């Protein structure tokens, strides 16, 4: 499916539009399948989005919260993606605790924790094999073109036989969705803001090698939507905006 590109005038408009879209997609998923599974991204961009979603009127009992990637730190660490999302959103709404499924980072063995999360997903979706379809996968993009914890020229980019693997950020382990799992998503949303992302976007939408710009590997069977502010959107080739 051809990617949808939305360029909003500023960050505030970008966050408002993304929240509106997610609310609609959450309601549609619940209407269709009785629940909505959402994989959250980390970093700084989505924090105001999570704060806005905390104000939404949604059937919280039908939401299942996953993470698309996680730093390999305790869940109360300042760098934890799970901590950021809980403080900005999840602690404010009545999603059943057993439906909030952070990536495990406590065994001091990233591969073991990645395998544990894979089993968690297989049980959640009742799919002992194959690739489950997460309803909404929210992604960010670094200024180097990485997404989730799929960093340029790392082994995680080529993993095709697992749902979850160990990413590598400058030698620090991460837990991350693999490319096949991301590409099975029903709605894959990139939320990207800031002029510092222009260069990476121009490569992702250009002829760059995906091993150097991993966001290029995101080619889902479902909907791919890029939600950008004007500052980042300047990086999209004029003919594609
Ligand atoms: O764990 C993480 O950091 C994220 O999942 C990562 O992929 C993030 O989305 C990008 O690095 C963009 O981060 P910013 O939104 O802070 O630019």
Image (tube, rainbow, N blue to C red):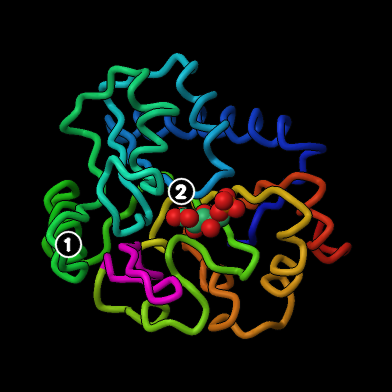
**Quadrant assignment, res 213:** bottom right
**Relative to 42, residue 71 above or below:** below
Tag of residue 42: 2
How many neighbours does mark 1 have within 10 angstroms: few (below 14), some (14-19), or many (20 or more)? Answer: many
Under 8 Å from ligand 1: the CB of mark 2?
yes
* Residue 57 placement (x, y as % from top left): 45, 14
Q: Give the residue at x 21% y 67%.
A: 110
What SS does tag 2 mark? Answer: loop
Residue 59 belongs to the span the image colors magenta:
no
Place of residue 194 in the rendered image (x, y in percent of width and height, measured from the top left) = 73, 50
| Crowd tier of the residue under label 2, counting other residues whose Cα lies within 10 Å: few below 14, some 14–19, many 20 or above | many
Of the image marks 1 and 2, the number of the one nearer the N terminus: 2
Write the residue at 24% across / 72% down: 162
Residue 1 left/right relative to 130:
right
Q: Main secondary structure of the magenta part?
A: strand
Percent across and percent down for residue 19 are 56, 30
For residue 240, above or below residue 65: below
Residue hosting label 1: 113
**Distance from the alpha carbon under mark 1 to that under mark 2:** 18 Å
Whether residue 122 sits left or right of residue 161 in the image: it is left
> Residue at (35%, 31%) from the top-left corner?
86
Asked if labels 2 and 1 touch by Cβ distance under 8 angstroms, the answer is no
Residue at x 76% of width, y 53% of height:
232
Instruction: Name the image quarter holding the C terminus.
Output: bottom right
Q: Which residues are magenta?
A: 163-180
**Depth check, front residue: 148 or 107:** 107
Q: Secondary structure at mark 1?
A: helix
Work out which quarter of the rendered image holds the N terminus and state it: bottom right
């Amino acid at each position: 499916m051809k990617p949808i590109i939305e360029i909003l005038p500023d960050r505030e408009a970008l966050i408002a539009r993304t929240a509106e879209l997610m609310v609609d997609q959450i309601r549609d998923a619940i209407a269709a399948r009785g629940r909505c599974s959402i994989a959250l991204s980390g970093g700084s961009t989505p924090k105001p989005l999570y704060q806005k979603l905390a104000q939404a009127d949604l059937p919280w009992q039908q939401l299942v919260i996953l993470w698309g990637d996680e730093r390999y730190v305790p869940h109360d660490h300042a760098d934890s993606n799970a901590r950021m999302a809980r403080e900005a959103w999840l602690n404010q709404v009545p999603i059943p605790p057993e439906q909030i499924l952070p990536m495990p980072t406590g065994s001091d063995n990233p591969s073991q924790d990645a395998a544990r999360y894979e089993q968690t997903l297989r049980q959640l979706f009742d799919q002992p094999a194959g690739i489950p379809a997460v309803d909404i996968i929210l992604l960010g993009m670094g200024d180097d073109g990485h997404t989730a914890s799929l960093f340029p020229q790392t082994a995680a980019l080529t993993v095709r036989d697992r749902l979850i693997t160990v990413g590598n950020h400058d030698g620090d382990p991460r837990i991350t969705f693999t490319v096949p799992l991301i590409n099975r998503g029903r709605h894959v949303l990139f939320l990207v803001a800031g002029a510092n992302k222009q260069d990476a976007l121009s490569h992702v939408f250009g002829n760059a090698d995906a091993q150097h710009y991993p966001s290029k590997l995101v080619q889902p069977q479902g909907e791919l939507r890029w939600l950008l502010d004007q500052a980042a959107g300047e990086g999209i080739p004029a003919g594609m905006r």
